[in-house]
Image (cartoon, grey):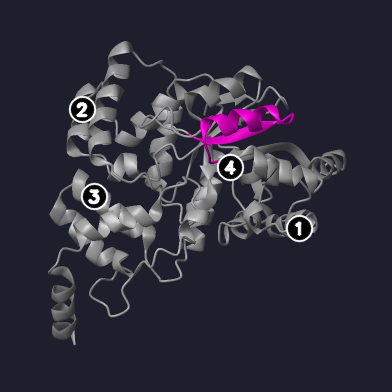
Amino acid sequence: MQYRLDKMSGNKLSVLGFGCMRFPRAADETERLVIDAIEAGINYFDTAYIYPGSEETLGGILAKHKARDRVFIATKLPLVLCRGPADFDKFFRRELERLQTEYVDYYLMHMLTDLARWNELCRWGIREWIAEKKKAGKIRQAGFSFHGSQGEFLAILDAYDWDFCQIQYNYSDENYQAGVTGLKAAAKKGIPVIVMEPLLGGKLVTGLPAEGSALFTAASPSPEAPRSPAAWAFRWLWNQDEVTVVLSGMSAQSQLRENLRTAGENAPLTAAELAVYRAVRAVFGKSYRVHCTGCNYCMPCPRHVNIPGCFAAYNASFSIGFVEGMKQYVTGTAATSANSSRATHCTACGACETHCPQHLPIRRHLKEVRGRMEPFWFGALMGMVRLVMR
């Protein structure tokens, strides 16, 4: 495992961090993954209050194996749930209980989107609250995770003496959200940058068109054992010195093993390899219509629409093929059921858009999904299938 220095604290952080939002369903499998990751040298674990069961699971595993002192825990204040200053302590105490710890190494303001929100928190006394917790040793490093425009990121970066930050960043779009400009601005201040969504919610693997995968395979050093699209994505990030830690939501031993192999490489990318990324980006951009990462923050929908499932199938219909996309749409939305979660049930209430960290025009995109994935015959066909199934 390679490590990069957090210049603000002096901590040496593993370049590969464990994102805990997508733990496996089986508790024993999760336990093996976490412990194997620690034994392999991963020391940064990222969770959050609003990741269902994540904090409790991580805390329980670390306590059982007496591994708390071997790792850095990052978790987050759920700003979306905060209604006033009293909520800071309420949620923080609960997080310490869930994690079975006396302190948090890296504590983030979760999903800061603009300077106005930070200023509101300041009026609530967040600066003083952080200072109090740091003085008491309850919070070691204070930072924020960001989902917003590049300009807002730069404004927030200058608004407080942050210890670190977390941004969405991958090779598919260097200028999305904070982007490469934000990355370099943070690094110039000496602020460690934690990268989330390195695979765009898995879309740079499962949603990558065959043409893009073929480009990566052809450029691999060993055609007999080519680098996977995931490995290419991680190498692009680790090729940049400004990136401190890359989070991966590993849910299988195979993913852990592959990521560890990739994290062990330290050869810089060649000019020819960088050219491959540009070619793959062009291919990917043609087929990827909705930039949904599948984070599920938009859920649950009041009308029970499976929003991430709709978008995944819609994108697949372009990248993989219409038939495969339609299969995913039918199964992912339970379209043959009377209680389906199809896009057609959207009433454009807009509740989803208030929670989307990507600020996607979800209502507009769902109309596009309906137009492509629910042609005029679709409803009648699903009705006939239901009759046959009965």
Dot 3, how many residues are within 10 Å of its Cα: few (below 14), some (14-19), or many (20+)?
Answer: many
Q: Amino acid at mark 2?
A: Leu
Mark 4: amino acid: Thr
Query: Neighbour class for label 4 at 10 Å: few (<14), some, many (≥20)?
Result: many
Q: Quadrant of residue 231?
A: top left
Mark 3 sits on what residue?
Answer: 316
Q: Which numbered disc, 1 or 4, marks the residue that appears first in the sequence?
A: 1
Residues at marks 3 and 2, CA–CA distance in whole angstroms: 19 Å
The magenta span reads 146-168
**Mark 1 or 3 closer to N-term?**
1
CA separation, marks 2 and 4?
35 Å
Please say if the residues under marks 3 and 4 sit with CB atoms less than 8 Å apart.
Answer: no
Mark nearer the viewer, 3 or 4: 4
Q: Where is the C terminus found, in terms of image quarters?
A: bottom left
Q: Which residue is mark 1?
A: 87
Secondary structure of residue under mark 1? helix
In space, the residues marked 2 and 1 are separated at their CA atoms by 50 Å
Query: Can residue 160 be found in the magenta stretch?
Result: yes
Residue 193 in view here: no
The image position of residue 27, as x and y in percent, is: 51, 62
Asked whether disc 1 touches disc 4, contact meaning CB atoms under 8 Å apart, the reply is no
**Circle 2 SS class:** helix
Relative vertical location of residue 218 with respect to residue 64 in this rendering, above or below? above
Q: Residue at label 4?
A: 113
Residue at 68% of width from left, 27% of height from top?
158
**Can residue 241 be seen here?**
yes
Which residue is under mark 2? 215
Closest to the observer, 263 or 234: 234
Mark 2 or mark 4, which has the lower sequence index? 4
